Amino acid sequence: MDKRLQKYAELIVKVGVNVQEGQMVVINAPVECAKFARILVEEAYKAKASYVLVRWHDDLIRKSYFTYASLDVIKEVPEYVVKQFEEIVGKKAAVISISAPTPGLLKDIDPEKLQTESISTYEKIGFYHKFLMGNGSQWVVCSYPTEAWAKKVFPNDKNAFEKLLEAILKASRVDEDGDAIKSWQDHMNNLARVNKILNNYNFKSLHFKNSLGTDLEIGLVNNHVWAGGGEYTQDGIYFSPNIPTEETFTMPHKDKVNGKVVSTKPLNYQGKLIEDFYLVFKDGAVVDFDARTEKDTLENLLKLDEGSNRLGEVALISYDSPISNSNILFYNTLFDENASCHLALGNAYSMNIKDGTKMTEEELIELGYNKSMEHVDFMFGSRDLEIVGTTFDGKKVQIFKNGNFVF
């Protein structure tokens, strides 16, 4: 296992963020993932990083903070925190984030406190998120288990941690004897093939339908770009922002979404699990919704700002894919979104418009780009999902049949 973890770390450093000689590297890591963080640090230095900064965090400490801190304290974002993010952006650091959530940990926390933190944080360090979403430098989200997360995924298994780690490595194409980097590059090439097909069609809109009640039409922005797998920074450095990944995605027009979408997996948002929910859109905005659990949390997300009830991303993934076929509900968007077609409420990616990373925010919004403090993916793919695209000359093209790509 140590050998596989070293291969996994090498994949993240060399392919995920593609560390350049002399580049600063930032690793965002839960304290429980210290073992893997140390391996990442060593691999980053071996790749000739100049300096590796590890930013530790802890879910239990975060819960104590929200339980006892006042709203006035939560509203404050210390200047030293802002300065740190300014340096990260200024030095165009490569950013590695280890995603290891504790699902449901914050279910009893006052939602006003969570909303207050989201708003305050965005106001002070929103520039950092815009920098990464605009591919100002390389970034990657990867994962490593914690005991609490593993027990949520495998509640009756005494070897839950080991079982989840194995599932993570398998989903990331890190085999015991195989060449993980070559396997990953082959996978990137296949995703690039799908992107090319979709971009050549230049669809005006997509229509989604299944037996669960999804009947949704999504208009796409003009000159949209399908992307997924590997991407390029504004300086032309190739990287892979998600490990694992199975998606090809693009930008919906913020005002051209109509119909109903029904979720097929729970959404872990702000430490709370939203389950069995649906959204109804009219002219781009959510006008009706419901959820079996945490409806108030879903409402808080939709009311966060003017863009959080509109779409910023539509992503296509075949139902017959490695993560889906594992039949594991990870309770982690990094994995669950790659088992299913998904949409994102909130901010769009500027790179999903031709030359979008060179445009001002005002120019992007004029084209249909959605602006928000949030970007939250939720899953709606199913075994019987049908997708039909309509081109600008009115031609209908089948994209999905029985949950899978037709090409």
Image: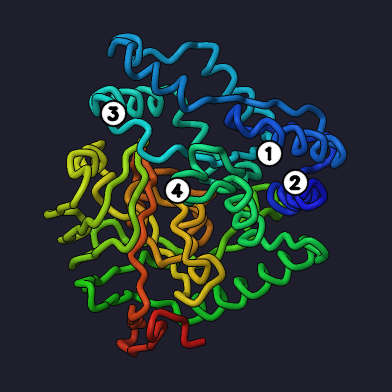
Q: Position of residue 256 (x, y in %)?
A: 24, 64
Give the side of residue 281 with respect to residue 253, left or right: left
The mark nearer the N terminus, 2 or 3, is 2
Quadrant in the rendering for residue 68: top left
Q: Residue at x 67, y 26 (%)?
A: 54
Q: Which type of secondary structure does the marked residue at label 4 adopt?
A: loop
The mark nearer the N terminus, 2 or 4, is 2
Circle on res. 115: 3
Q: Position of residue 251 (x, y in %)?
A: 40, 61
Question: Which residue is label 4 attached to?
Answer: 155
Q: Residue at x 15, y 53 (%)?
A: 290
Question: Which residue is label 1 attached to?
Answer: 94
The mark nearer the N terminus, 1 or 3, is 1
Q: CA distance from mark 2 to mark 3?
A: 34 Å
Q: Position of residue 214 (x, y in %)?
A: 23, 71
Q: CA distance from mark 3 to mark 4?
A: 30 Å
Quadrant in the rendering for residue 298: top left
Is label 2 in contact with label 1 (beta carbons under 8 Å)?
A: no
The mark nearer the N terminus, 2 or 1, is 2
Q: Between residue 99 and residue 2, name the one nearer to us.
A: 2
Q: Position of residue 5 (x, y in %)?
A: 75, 48
